[in-house]
Amino acid sequence: MFRIQTLNKISPLGLDLFPREKYEVASEIPNPHAILVRSADLHSVPIPDSVLAIARAGAGVNNIPIPLCSTRGIVVFNTPGGNANAVKELSIAALLIASRNILGGWNWGSTLAGRADRVPELVEKEKSKFEGPELRGKTLGVVGLGAIGVMVANDALALGMHVMGYDPYISVEAAWNLSHSVERADTLEGLLAKADYVSLHLPLNDTTRGLLDTEKFRIMKKGARIVNMARGGLVNEADIIGALNGGRLSAYVTDFPTAELLSCPRAVCIPHLGASTPEAEDNCAIMAVRQVMDYLETGTIKNSVNFPRCRLEFRAPYRLLVTNRNIPNMVGQITTILAEGSINITDLINHHHHEYAYNIIDTDQAIPPELLERLIEIDGVVRVRVLSSHSPEP
């Protein structure tokens, strides 16, 4: 029986997918085979040797020690697209907030409580202070065209905006979903120079950290507005506060508050509500559970952040799963050992992702323990698992 540990509250719509005859699910469980997590920080928590997979019910995986998991052959899954609609809707709301000074008007309006007899007069007198431009006809630059960025771009077109998109690594699937009316920007600088509004939809890593800074703000139109529902670190905080206070930028709406941003009048901080909808929580949980089940039962990897996508229809009696470092002659060594043990390979697939590779090898015969030991001893092999199509085992 597979044992699943939940470290946060995971939607029952996801957990109910685990067949109870094959899975035991609990928040406290010894030697789990997989961990389901949302925001719990695993960097300082010992991960048991029994763990084969960790699934994050969400897109970001900053709370998971990815390098450590990779060296131990632990597949880390996330759920890209599960919360895409929720973040997209908040991004569209943020564009309106950045443009129309809705928040300023709201805050001012709340000061009129108790002055009922003068409210109509005061509203008419002061409303011009909160004037802001319409979105229609303006240019939106979408940086990052993954699941969320594509949806924001398409919906902005429906609002009458001219939309430019920049993503040198756009996937085929995203390209299929992106409207042909979105103008492709060849460079980030080219997009920034033309955009009235910029919406960020990128992961945070060494190449994107501080992507928007004083140098980039100088390229942008004076008075441009920035929306960041992706990751706070994409924008250099000190630089954008300086650009806002100096009038270089008109507004910054972010889902990642800090004390410094909260003190900046032209910054609007939303308390990390991007994925905070019941629908998003359900979708992410369902995706996470299905990915874990596929991996534990068939070895299939989909939406992993540290190992390659890999799928092979499970039609043979036995399946060998080998995780290894992406170095030469690994497949040759593995197949040689199987041939020396008279194991007939019926199908094989090998994919790699950066430093690591993953092999699914189907066989007619069960692989004896002595061959498994030889496979494990190959220099560069990280993990070896064996499954049976009749009764998958942990």
Image (cartoon, rainbow, N blue to C red):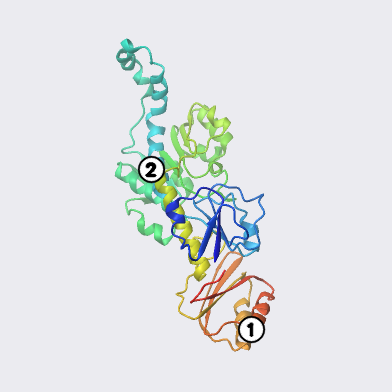
Task: Identify the residue shown where x is 34% and y is 44%.
Answer: 156
Label whose residue precedes the other's in the sequence (2 or 1): 2
Look at the image and tell me in which quarter the N terminus lies. bottom right
Would you call the spot at circle 2 few (<14 residues within 10 Å), some (14-19), or many (20 or more)? Answer: some
Give the residue number, with chain letter if any, for mark 2.
89
- Helix, strand or loop for disc 2: helix
| Location of residue 338 in the rendering, given as x and y in whole percent from the top left corner | 60, 84
Q: Choose between 264 and 136: the one closer to the eye.
A: 264
Find numbered disc 1 in the image and state the secondary structure of the residue it sits on: helix
Instruction: Name the amino acid, label 1.
Output: Ile
Give the percent coordinates (x, y) of residue 300.
49, 68
Q: Residue at x 40, y 57 (%)?
A: 174
The answer to whether residue 26 is above or below residue 339 is: above
The residue singled out by tag 1 in the image is 337
Question: Does residue 380 show up?
Answer: yes
- On the image, the x and y values in percent for residue 35 come to 56, 57
